[in-house]
């Protein structure tokens, strides 16, 4: 039989007291959070669409929390400065990230040294919304559908230019997915920004471009472009354009925005953020503002938000591997 010495008992009691005190302090911290301003890292420049959405959400979080939410823009290099800063931040709930899909799931795959690992260093907290893309061709092209595009591309191998808004961006990969699904063999021409890609199609220098719905819809309404598909799993409400999945079942390539924190952030804080973000995105005013930017709000539990992120990350991994894209 083991007999504990007085010294051993004292040490065990001290350890238990220390752990109990630490847990009490931890719980008190979570209950009192936030008692100072919260920093929101946004891995894009000020004024870009994700930044505008981040500020809409941030303003309302500040009201809900009674503390300032300071937007910290960290643009450049596929979002690496912002994402790496988020991953290396203190795990106390006072640094959160507003993360677009490309920065969270594509950047880690196409850069040799992304400086962050989304699988081990970051945790999704809440999904703000999804942002489907639209496929558009010149209105005078005679191409009426995705199936028409495939037939034309096969009849004219190597001659159908796809104006990609940016190399290895979500629209670029979405276009490569369409090309692969339909055996089209599209010739990809990457541009520096979406307006340049759109201009190429408007000028007749390219047959196809893919971008967010708002950026293309104005040209569709003016009659200069024809929308032939959207990349969501189903048709979008209020937009009479077929989903690409109607032609190629299982196809989906959507943008999204999530609130993400460093792994190890207190669970009580995570649950609080999730609840407040869901309440904000469910409000009619915010939903209307997001809709103007082609974002469809959704309310997820923490577990669902994390599963969604994991699924999207795995899908991008498979796609990058299938396309043979090498990290640069």
Image (cartoon, grey):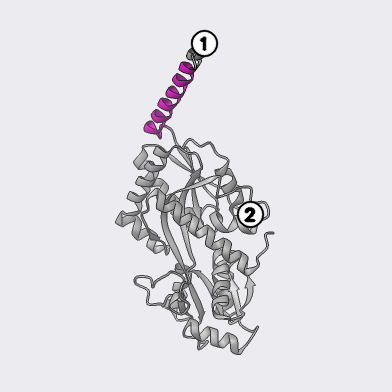
Percent across and percent down for residue 280 are 34, 50
Most common SS among magenta residues: helix
Taking 78 as reference, is 5 above or below it? above
Q: Earlier in the sequence, mark 1 or mark 2?
A: 1
Q: Residue at 40% x, 48% y: name it.
A: 302
Above or below, comparing residue 16 to residue 137 in the picture? above
Up-down relation of residue 274 to residue 24 (above or below): below
Task: Give the class, few, some or many, for how many residues have Cα within 10 Å of label 1's Cα (few <14, many ≥20).
Answer: few
Dot 1: element: helix
The magenta span reads 12-35
* Residue 253 at x, y percent in the picture: 49, 67
Q: What residue is shown at x 63% (from left), y 74% (from top)?
A: 188
The numbered mark at residue 150 is: none
Pick whichever, 320 or 197, lies toward us.
320
Query: What numbered label is drawn on residue 77?
Result: 2
Which of the numbered marks, if any, corresponds to residue 7?
A: 1
Q: Quadrant of the C terminus?
A: bottom right
């Amino acid at each position: 039989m083991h007999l504990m010495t007085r010294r051993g008992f004292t040490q065990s009691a001290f350890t238990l007291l220390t752990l109990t005190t630490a847990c009490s302090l931890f719980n008190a911290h979570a209950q009192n959070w936030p008692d100072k301003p919260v920093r929101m890292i946004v891995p894009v420049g000020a004024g870009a669409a994700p930044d505008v959405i981040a500020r809409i959400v941030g303003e309302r979080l500040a009201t809900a929390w009674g503390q300032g939410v300071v937007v910290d823009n960290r643009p450049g290099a596929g979002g690496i400065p912002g994402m790496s800063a988020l991953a290396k931040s203190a795990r106390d709930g006072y640094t959160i990230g507003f993360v677009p899909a490309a920065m969270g799931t594509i950047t880690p795959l196409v850069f040799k040294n992304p400086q962050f690992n989304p699988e081990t260093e970051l945790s999704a907290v809440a999904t703000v919304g999804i942002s489907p893309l639209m496929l558009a061709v010149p209105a005078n092209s005679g191409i009426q559908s995705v199936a028409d595009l495939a037939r034309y591309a096969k009849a004219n191998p190597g001659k159908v230019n796809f104006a990609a808004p940016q190399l290895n961006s979500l629209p670029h990969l979405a276009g490569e997915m369409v090309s692969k699904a339909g055996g089209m063999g599209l010739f990809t021409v990457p541009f520096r920004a979406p307006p340049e890609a759109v201009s190429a199609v408007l000028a007749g220098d390219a047959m196809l471009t893919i971008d967010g719905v708002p950026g293309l819809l104005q040209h569709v309404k003016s009659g200069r472009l024809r929308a032939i598909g959207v990349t969501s799993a189903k048709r979008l409400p209020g937009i009479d354009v077929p989903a690409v999945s109607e032609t190629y079942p299982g196809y989906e390539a959507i943008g999204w925005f999530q609130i993400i924190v460093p792994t190890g952030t207190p669970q009580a804080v995570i649950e609080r953020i999730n609840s407040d973000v869901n309440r904000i995105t469910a409000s009619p005013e915010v939903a209307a503002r997001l809709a103007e930017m082609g974002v469809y709000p959704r309310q997820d539990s923490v577990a669902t938000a994390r599963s969604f992120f994991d699924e999207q990350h795995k899908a991008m991994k498979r796609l990058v591997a299938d396309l043979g894209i090498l990290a640069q």
